[in-house]
Image (spheres, rainbow, N blue to C red):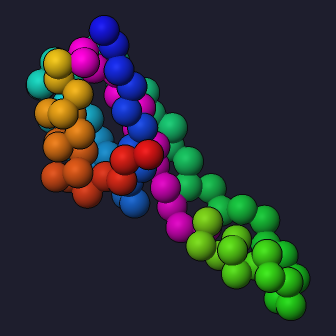
């Protein structure tokens, strides 16, 4: 059975290094979503700006498909390299 993991990283290098390690562990598939594009800014007096400023930090997504038996190993690898699981 195939299981998907979604992780985010704060920098591209760490994400790519993690993907390299995951490939060596035999994951089924890896997909990148190299976001990090800042969102539009709102007026300074708006509450939304404070929420938006949090979202402007670069975020690089990695979706990993693994066999169910390797799920925990992939999770541990992502966390070891600083990824946040979602």
Residue extending farthest to the top is 1
Residue at 49%, 55% in the rendered image: 59
Q: Choose between 82 and 71: the one closer to the eye.
A: 71
> Left or right: where does residue 34 sit relative to residue 41?
left
- Quadrant in the rendering for residue 16: top left
Locate residue 50 relative to residue 60 in the image: left or right.
right
Queried whether the magenta region covers residue 64, the answer comes back as yes
Depth check: 32 or 46 in front?
A: 46
Q: Based on the displayed image, in which of its 4 quarters is residue 74 positioned?
A: top left
Give the overall secondary structure of the magenta segment. strand
Q: Is residue 71 visible?
A: yes
Residue 3 percent coordinates (x, y): 35, 20
Q: Residue at x 61, y 66 (%)?
A: 55
At 37% from the left edge and 47% from the top edge, which residue is drawn? 85
Q: Where is residue 61 in the image (x, y as percent from the top left)?
A: 46, 43
The quarter of the displayed image where residue 45 is located: bottom right
Q: How many labels does the image show?
A: 0
Is residue 35 positioned above or below 66 on the image?
Answer: below
Q: Is residue 27 magenta?
A: no
Residue 84: % across, % down: 36, 53
Q: Residue at x 37, y 33 (%)?
A: 5
| Quarter placement of the N terminus | top left
Residue 18 visible in the current orientation = no
The magenta stretch is 56-68
Q: In this view, does 36 lie above or below 67?
A: below
The image position of residue 4, as x and y in percent, is: 39, 25
């Amino acid at each position: 059975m195939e299981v998907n993991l979604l992780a985010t990283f704060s920098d591209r290098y760490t994400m790519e290094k993690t993907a390299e390690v995951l490939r060596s562990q035999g994951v089924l598939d890896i997909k990148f979503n190299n976001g990090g594009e800042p969102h539009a800014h709102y007026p300074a007096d708006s509450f939304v700006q404070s929420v938006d400023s949090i979202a402007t930090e670069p975020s690089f997504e990695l979706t990993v498909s693994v066999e169910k038996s390797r799920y925990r190993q992939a999770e541990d690898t992502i966390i070891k390299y600083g990824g946040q699981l979602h």
